[in-house]
Structure formats: C-alpha cells, structure tokens
Amino acid sequence: MNTSTSTPERVSTPATRFVLAAAQYPVSAPRDWHEVEQQLSQWCAEAAAHEAKLLLFPEYASMSLAALFAAEVQADLHAQIHAMQALRERYVDLHRALARQHHAYIVAGSFPWQLTDGSFRNRAWLCAPDGRADFQDKRVMTRFEREQWHIAGGDALKVFDTALGCLAIDICYDIEFPLLARAQAEAGAKLILSPSCTDTLGGYHRVRVGAQARALENQCYTVQAPLVGEAPWSPAIDINVGAAGVFGPPDRAFPDDGVVALGTLNSAQWIYAEIDTARVHAVRTQGQVFNHRHWSDQFDGGIATALPMIERVVL
C-alpha cells in the first residue's frame, strides 16, 4: 500500500481544538457560473460565521456544474464529465479563494478528473488558507463508477499535515474498507473525512456504518458529508440521500454511542462539531479498550480446522 504525506500549509504546532463543518449540500441546477460562485460563497460564509476552520463538502457535489451545458450533454453520463474538464481549474480556484478569504481549510466536493491518458478519477481537493491545494483520489470504486461511468480508482493514499493536525480523506465507498483508514491512522491521521454520495438509505447507512467502524477501530474522529436532494435532469446525481455525521469511538471523552453530531436526514444544512484531537490521544492511551494499539493482535495465529460438528445419523 502506497501512503504519501502531503503538506498543503507549513505547520508549526497544530491546533488541537477547532470547529468542523460538514455539509449536507443540496444538488442544484445553476444557470451560469455566477450562481455557482454565489451558492458556494454563501455556504462558506455561513460556516465561517460559526467559526468553522475545516469545511467538508460531499462527494460529486461538482456534478451540479453539468447543468451549465446543453440538455443532450446533461443527459449523457460520459459527455457531461468530458465537458466539465473545461471548468475544473476554475472550480478548484474558487475553493482556494474561499479558503483564503475565510482562513479555513475546505475540502471541495469531489470532481471527475480526467488524467492525461484519458482516464478519470474521483478527486477531492483539500484547499488550505494560504492558497495551496492537494488532492485525494478515491481508491475503491462502486459498481456504478466501474460498470457504467468508467471512473477508475486512484493510486496514492495520502495523509495531510495541516495547522489543524494530521487528517485524511476516504471518499464514500473507501470508508467501508478498513485497511485504507488503518494505513492513514498509522501514518498519523486523527481525523478521517468521508465525503459521500448515495442514492438509497441503504447506501447512506453503509457509509455511515463504515465511518463509525473506522472511528472505533482507529480510536479517532471520522466525518461523513453527503450530497442531498434530487436532480431529475442528471443521470449521475438524480437522487441523493443522507445525513452528515461526526463520529468517534464509544469510549472515554466521547459519547456512549460514538455520535458526536448528526444532521437531519436529507435536509440542506451544515452540521458543526468541535474537534479536539487531544481526546484521540487520551482515548488511545487511557481508554477502556485499546482498539488502535491492539490492531495487530487480530493477525496472531492463523485459521485452525475445527472438529467436524455434523451430526451423523444412521438410517
């Protein structure tokens, strides 16, 4: 597994306590770029008014940009993401500008990013207050992405050293795979962000259960931020279901159910939570259990063949 470390901003002593905002961001059909800027600016201003220093937008929040193209492009899964490449630098630059304006870190809604070989990745950009940006590509693709959309999985798995501490991004389905988050936790991540996009309650709960399991296993914070609402004009984001959530291990210094904050299902809203990474250190060193420390114990020994337990009946 390839784990690289990215540093969007020079870090001295990271803050241990800050406000995080996770978006239940609504799909829309902007008529022009001005509406795109206006909506994102309003959302970021609202989070900044709550003193949020880290803003997380959902997976494929960028797909509303396809509404800017002709109807025949909107209706075509492949034509829309090819057309969107003309907007991608502008899209990232907008988030970089908003990060500078509000002196906050912003994870932009993930974008179907075309590489030089013509293939696509599901890419989430982390924009820092100093204007720098780096990205995490989704690693494990869903059936829809593989079989219908032909978006491929990325290569490098990263952690980001920031003024808020070490964090990581596992896009939607990725959070359902424990070894990804484990590699990031071992590389120093105390906060794992999971932007998501799901079209059923079952899909939403799969991601949520994954996020809560990763928080338990690694004794860290995890955050889910879903796309919500309907866009009948789009074959990619026509139905979107979910609620934002911030989770931790059900142990000392965290809620008994591990739910730090939870939004209202399918409502367009921010949810806010105070993140205190000192609690992660505390629970890893003084918790009732040591899931993080005892991870390797599960690999001790092997699989032994048990005695047959089938009742033998003589007829």
Image (cartoon, rainbow, N blue to C red):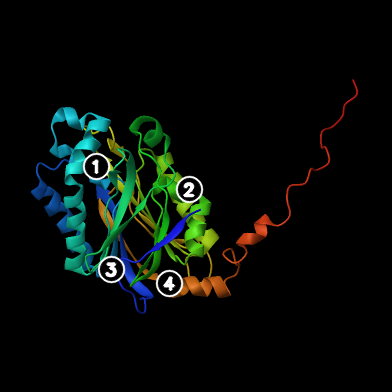
Residue 279: tell me if it is visible.
Answer: yes
C-alpha gap between disc 4 and disc 1: 33 Å
Q: Which mark is residue 53?
A: 3
- Which residue shows up at 73% across the image and 55% down it? 301
User: Which of the two labelled residues, at mark 1 and mark 3, occupies the earlier sequence position?
Assistant: 3
Q: Amino acid at mark 4?
A: Thr
Splitting the image into 4 quarters, where does residue 309 fall?
top right
Residue lying at the far top of the rendered structure:
315
Q: Position of residue 88 (x, y in %)?
A: 20, 47
Q: Residues within 10 Å of mark 4 (few under 14, many from 20)?
A: many
Do tag 3 and tag 4 residues touch (Cβ < 8 Å)? no
Splitting the image into 4 quarters, where does residue 42 fall?
bottom left
Q: Which residue is mark 1?
A: 63
- Which residue shows up at 13% across the image and 53% down it? 37
Q: Is residue 41 above or below residue 252?
A: above
Residue in the foreground of this view, choosing between 123 and 210:
123
User: Which of the two labelled residues, at mark 2 and mark 3, occupies the earlier sequence position?
Assistant: 3
Provide the secondary structure element on which disc 2 rests. helix
Q: Amino acid at mark 2?
A: Glu
C-alpha gap between disc 1 and disc 3: 25 Å
Q: Position of residue 198 (x, y in %)?
A: 36, 41
Q: Residues within 10 Å of mark 1 (few under 14, many from 20)?
A: many
Q: Position of residue 67 (x, y in %)?
A: 16, 38
Provide the secondary structure element on which disc 1 rests. helix
Q: Which residue is mark 2?
A: 176
C-alpha gap between disc 2 and disc 3: 26 Å
Give the number of marks.
4
C-alpha gap between disc 3 and disc 4: 14 Å
Q: Is residue 59 above or below residue 166?
A: above
Q: Which residue is mark 4?
A: 277
Residue lying at the far front of the rendered structure:
117
Which one is closest to the eye, mark 4 or mark 1?
Answer: 1
